[in-house]
Structures are given as C-alpha cells and as structure tokens.
Image: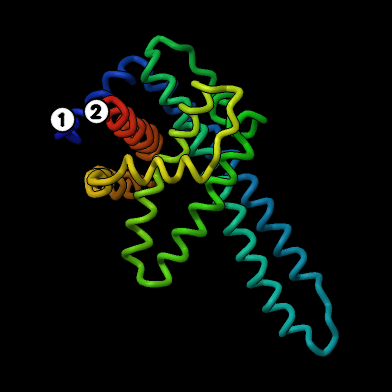
Amino acid sequence: MQNYKTRKELKNDTKALFKGRWKDAILLNIFPTIISIVITLLFAALVVALVNYSDAGSNYWLNDSMMSDDGNGTSNIGGGILTTFFTVGISFTFLDWFRNPSMEIQPIKMGLQVFTKKYFLRVLLIYIISTIFTTLWSLLFIIPGIIKSYAYSQAYLIYKDRSNLSPNEKISSLDCITESKNLMKGNKWRLFLLDLSFLGWGILSILSLGIGLLWLLPYQNATKVAFYEDLIQSN
C-alpha cells in the first residue's frame, strides 16, 4: 500500500515552497488571469457588437436570439480553453519550482509557456479529448462526469514529464489521459477532498471582494501540483 502524504502535509509543502516568495507565486497567477479576463471581455464585446448590428429583415429577433446564444456558447468554449491553458502553464511552472525550489520565476513567460510549440498542440488535444469523454459520461448522470474529470486531471502534468524525459518522442495525448486514469485509481476521492478543503477559504476570499484570491489561487494550484508529485513519488 502506497504511503501518500496527507492534505496537511501537501499544504505544508506548498507553504514551505512559498516562504519568502509569495510575491513570485502571486505574480505567476495574476498575469495570466488578467490576460484571460481582458481577452474574454474583448471577445464578449465583439459578440455583443455583432448581435447589436445584425439585421435579418423579418427574422431579426429570431436570428438575433440565435446569434446571441451561439455567441455565448462560443465565448464559453473560448474562455474554457484559455482558462485551461493558463492554469496548465502555471501548474507546469509550479512543478518545476517544486523540483528546483531556488529557481527564478518569470511570471509572464512561464505563465504563458503552454502557448509555445512544445506544448500547445498536445495540451489542446488533451483538453478536447478529455472534455469529450467527460461530456459523454455526464450524459449518463452528472456524477460519472465529475468522477471522470478527476480521473483525467493529471494528464497535463504527465505530458509535461514525458515530454521532458523524451523530447524527441511523439507523445500521444490519449496515452497521457489513460496514464492519468491509472494513476488516479484509488486517488480520485483524495483529490476531491483536497479540493473541498479549500472551499472555506474560497468563501472568505469572495467575502473579501476577491482580494483573498490573490493568495488562495497560487496556494490551491501549487498544492494540487504537490498532490501530483506525491502520486509520482509514491508510485
């Protein structure tokens, strides 16, 4: 039986990593977040402009409604991809940071690293494939979809490790998802409880008008990377 770290131990690992370097952790998370918000708002504004200036004769109101729905759907998909890319880039940086605690953090460059040739296509494919699988499972019932989302959750970090170990190897996105499923057997509930343990802090952060999120987001993201590192070390 593997001897996994407790939630408290994982959080302590993150606190130890951030000791004296909370500024780096906050900046790493805040720059991609700002960029994501700006791009999403610009995209939403473009959709609204197209809706407002559309004119389809007698079917104006019908087409206007349909266009609005399509625009919202497209905006949600685009926002989901952007959020995933930024979150994955931050997670990649935290993984390197855990393995090299003294490394210099370059917030913008590292936070946007998924948009490079090395990662972009595979991360996008992992996102698309895992989203399709999760959606199909959710058609049965919402619970199976949630369970599968946890099963696939380590695929991005697995891809990063495999791409670093074998730079010239063509790594299959589906293989990374499958490996994540295997790695998460018996561990999905542990990750769910880890997520749940941040709920109280999330509520307090919202009550602080979002200011608390500046500390909570890097703390939560890094702790989930510590969870992956613990899985790898224990297996």
**Which quadrant would the C terminus be assigned to in this image?**
top left
Taking the spot 39% from the left edge, 42% from the top edge, the residue there is 180
Q: In the picture provided, is 66 more to the left or to the right than 174?
A: right
119 or 209, which is in the foreground? 119
Q: Where is residue 44 in the image (x, y as percent from the top left)?
A: 66, 58
| Residue, disc 2 | 234
Taking the spot 62% from the left edge, 37% from the top edge, the residue there is 120
Local packing at callout 1 (Cα closer than 10 Å; few below 14, some 14-19, many 20+) is: few
| Residue, disc 1 | 3
Q: Earlier in the sequence, mark 1 or mark 2?
A: 1
Say which element carries label 2: helix
Above or below — where is 64 with respect to 173?
below
Label number found at residue 230: none
Counting the numbered discs, the total is 2
Taking the spot 81% from the left edge, 73% from the top edge, the residue there is 54
Identity, as a three-letter code, of the amino acid under mark 1: Asn
Above or below — where is 77 with respect to 108?
below
Say which element carries label 1: loop
147 or 85, which is in the foreground? 147
Taking the spot 76% from the left edge, 70% from the top edge, the residue there is 52
Asked whether residue 82 appears in the rendered view, the answer is yes
Identity, as a three-letter code, of the amino acid under mark 2: Ser
Q: Quadrant of residue 12?
A: top left
Task: Name the residue furthest bottom.
Answer: 58
Asked if the residue at tag 2 contacts the one at tag 1, i.e. Cβ–Cβ closer than 8 Å, the answer is: yes
Q: In which quarter of the image is residue 70?
A: bottom right
Q: Position of residue 186 (x, y in %)?
A: 23, 46
Q: Where is residue 92 in the image (x, y as percent from the top left)?
A: 47, 29
